[in-house]
Amino acid sequence: MFYPEPIAKLIDAFGHLPGIGPKTAGRLAFHVLRMKEEDVVDFAKALVNVKRNLHYCSVCCNITDVDPCRVCQDKSRDISTICVVQEPKDMVAMERTKEFRGYYHVLHGAISPMEGIGPDEIRIADLLKRLSDERVQELILATNPNIEGEATAMYLSRLVRPFGLKVTRIAHGLPVGGDLEYADEVTLTKALEGRREL
Amino acid sequence: MFYPEPIAKLIDAFGHLPGIGPKTAGRLAFHVLRMKEEDVVDFAKALVNVKRNLHYCSVCCNITDVDPCRVCQDKSRDISTICVVQEPKDMVAMERTKEFRGYYHVLHGAISPMEGIGPDEIRIADLLKRLSDERVQELILATNPNIEGEATAMYLSRLVRPFGLKVTRIAHGLPVGGDLEYADEVTLTKALEGRREL
């Protein structure tokens, strides 16, 4: 005796999402059963639309429903700086600061020999094409502060050396609101190294 | 600057599910973006099918894609016993034991004055109708062992008294594989009360 087929299929679909185990999948499926039909139809449409209406921006490789994406279309931004991030989410995080007014480049990953991801698997070639534009003067490497992100930043900084650009890496240090006592040694060392005069 | 509309909508839809916060919703939406299109379409279909193809069984009130449901259609089961559970999930849990061969009745909830759920909000009237069948001899109350479940069991046991049925409640006690040391006082008291001669 199992669940009727429609609900079993939905539990299975939810269970294939990352971080969702069989119990949560069951809970979600029964929640759907109690949702209003129009909301469920909207949810289903949203799922399909994400696959059908989103593409990569031909300029910055970010996901977008228009091409070029809205950021690349925005002529008011500063063409002299390109900020390189790993994922679309990282770009949104940068935008939330409202501090950066240049353009972005989304790599969609980081170099990770362990997972078999080399420079050709991420959007590095597209980045190099953009650097031939002489107005670009600075490349900010904002990949994640972990091994893969650091390796990617290091690789990129060497790769773009022939372009004669200013290449910078976002700062490592203590997070604002953090606690010195709980900071790990590596972060604290980086914070010390990166100290600035007041 | 926000996400492109299709992904923002999907994040919003995931975020409305129980136990899914904005960060998890974002992670799930980006996972969908990386899924194969056919898998996403299947997922969307599964969602809509659950709403469109599932109904309540006209006999036991369980969710089903055929009416009466497969359990109620099964003539090999024992008509003398009806097991009352709160949710379809509970019925599946009972079926997994492979010990019970009677029929079920799904209440779809429990009496909870705190949440404004009275006897009329759950499928009690449908249960009473079934009890007029003279072949039914025992009613097993398998509502959850918490306040609402106990209250519902108590209410039902009084309500069906005029039918002259045997009314039983599933046993409380220590879970198999559990640890006496960690059992709470109420469970331990119930386990003592329910002790049986060996």
Image (cartoon, coloured by chain):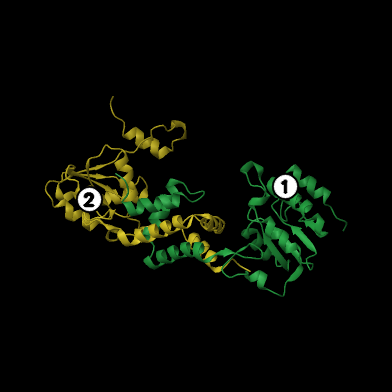
Chain colours: A yellow, B green
Q: Amino acid at mark 1?
A: Ala
Secondary element at tag 2: helix
The quadrant in which the C terminus of chain B is found is: bottom right
How would you rate the neighbour count of disc 2 (Cα within 10 Å): few for under 14, some for 14-19, many for 20 or more? Answer: few
As displayed, is residue B48 above or below residue A92? below
**Disc 1 or disc 2, which is closer to the eye?**
1
Relative to the observer, which residue lies in front, B127 or A2? B127
As displayed, is residue B61 above or below residue A172? below
| Label total for image | 2
Q: Is residue A143 visible?
A: no
* The quadrant where residue A142 appears: top left
Residue A53 — which label? Answer: none
As displayed, is residue B197 above or below residue A78? below
Q: Residue at x 75, y 69 (%)?
A: B79
Where's residue B3, x and y in %? 32, 49
Where's residue A13, x and y in %? 48, 63
Q: Amino acid at mark 2?
A: Arg
Where's residue A146, x and y in %? 37, 47
Where's residue B137, x and y in %? 80, 64
Secondary element at tag 1: helix
How would you rate the neighbour count of disc 1 (Cα within 10 Å): few for under 14, some for 14-19, many for 20 or more? Answer: some
Residue B151 — which label? Answer: 1
Q: Which residue is mark 2?
A: A158
Q: Residue furthest top?
A: A198
